[in-house]
Image (cartoon, rainbow, N blue to C red):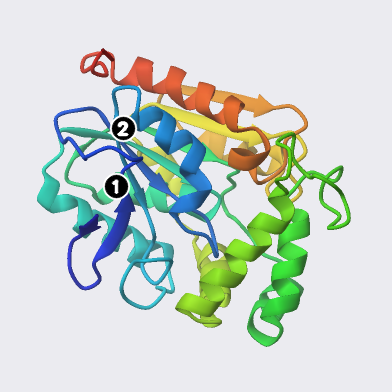
Amino acid sequence: MKLGTQPALFAYTGGKPFDPAKPCFVFLHGAQHDHSVWILQSRYLAHHGYSVLTFDLPGHGASDGPALTSVEEIAAGVAAALAPLALDAVLLVGHSMGSLIALELARGIDAGVAGVALLATAAPMRVADALLDATRAAPDAAMQMINLWSHRAGIAPFAARPGNPGPGFNIVWSNLRLMQRIAQRNGAHVLANDFAACNNYRAGLEAAHALRAPALLVLGSADQMTPPRAAADLIAAIAQPKTVVTLAGTGHALMAENPDGVRAALLQFAQRVFASKPAVAMA
């Protein structure tokens, strides 16, 4: 479904019609990605009593507009898309760059925020100068580097087979192909915009301290891009009740490397924060 205008944003609803009366998850992807990175978690939740809005961010995937250049602008775009729905409460879930957007969105959204889940996160989320330069001057090479670092070392080499417990499915190659499709569909500038937005966002700790809802942090013990130690300042800044889940042997691509661990953490968190508005029982 498309939401809002200027730009209109595409949101995947998990294979179910969107029902604003149900407790709602809002999923926000990371740099050079789209809604598909959440496919396993969003479909499960949509088929187990929740509504889901799994966004393509502006200028990504099927969403309109150019890729925006700051976390603040992206959050404002998502807020504008959500506003006409007049939702009672939402659970914001963001991965990597999306976690920064979730923090910023929690400050400006009109709907009540029941909780905020931050996956593979850090604040500030600094990017090495050499990588920033590569995203502008050599985006193909940058995507190769990013894709390797996005997965735990044991499966990161492109020669590794199958790269995932599922037969015939290689998450390293799949992730690279997704990044390439975003570049082909939305433009080579998207990668540089996204990584610059992460690097330039300096309000993360302030936004974390301003949270008025419980927080969940899901970290990967083998994350090479945002290792668990990088989240220490962010965790300390959150004054609201918080839960930290560290998934053993899991890299930055949490949703693909450990889909069941991510799903379980999100479901348990949702059951707590939506306690006054439980999911609709399945027939």
Vertical comparison of 95 with 187: above or below: above
Q: Is residue 252 left or right of residue 264?
A: right
Question: Looking at the picture, which amino acid does disc 2 mark?
Answer: Arg
Vertical comparison of 28 with 249: above or below: below
Residue that protrudes farthest toward the front in the picture: 168
The tag on residue 107 is 1
Q: Quadrant of the C terminus?
A: top left
Residue 156 location (% of width, % of height): 82, 51
What secondary structure is marked by label 2?
loop
Residue 67 location (% of width, % of height): 42, 74
Residue drawn at (52%, 55%), measured in percent from left and top? 30
Vertical comparison of 261 with 37: above or below: above
Q: Earlier in the sequence, mark 2 or mark 1?
A: 1
Nearest the viewer among 202 and 223 is 223
What residue would you read off at disc 2?
Answer: 212
Question: Looking at the picture, which amino acid does disc 1 mark?
Answer: Arg
Q: Count residues near mark 2 (Cα–Cα under 10 Å), then give few for <14, some for 14-19, many for 20+.
A: some
Q: Is residue 277 left or right of residue 70?
A: left
Residue drawn at (55%, 40%), measured in percent from left and top? 119
Residue drawn at (52%, 49%), measured in percent from left and top? 37
Residue 28 location (% of width, % of height): 42, 50
Q: Is residue 196 visible?
A: no
Residue drawn at (52%, 23%), measured in percent from left and top? 265
Nearest the viewer among 209 and 34 is 34
Q: Count residues near mark 1 (Cα–Cα under 10 Å), then give few for <14, some for 14-19, many for 20+.
A: some
Q: Is residue 211 visible?
A: yes
Vertical comparison of 137 with 32: above or below: below
Q: In which image quadrant can residue 148 be found?
A: bottom right
The tag on residue 71 is none
Residue that protrudes farthest toward the bottom in the picture: 137
Residue 221 location (% of width, % of height): 74, 33
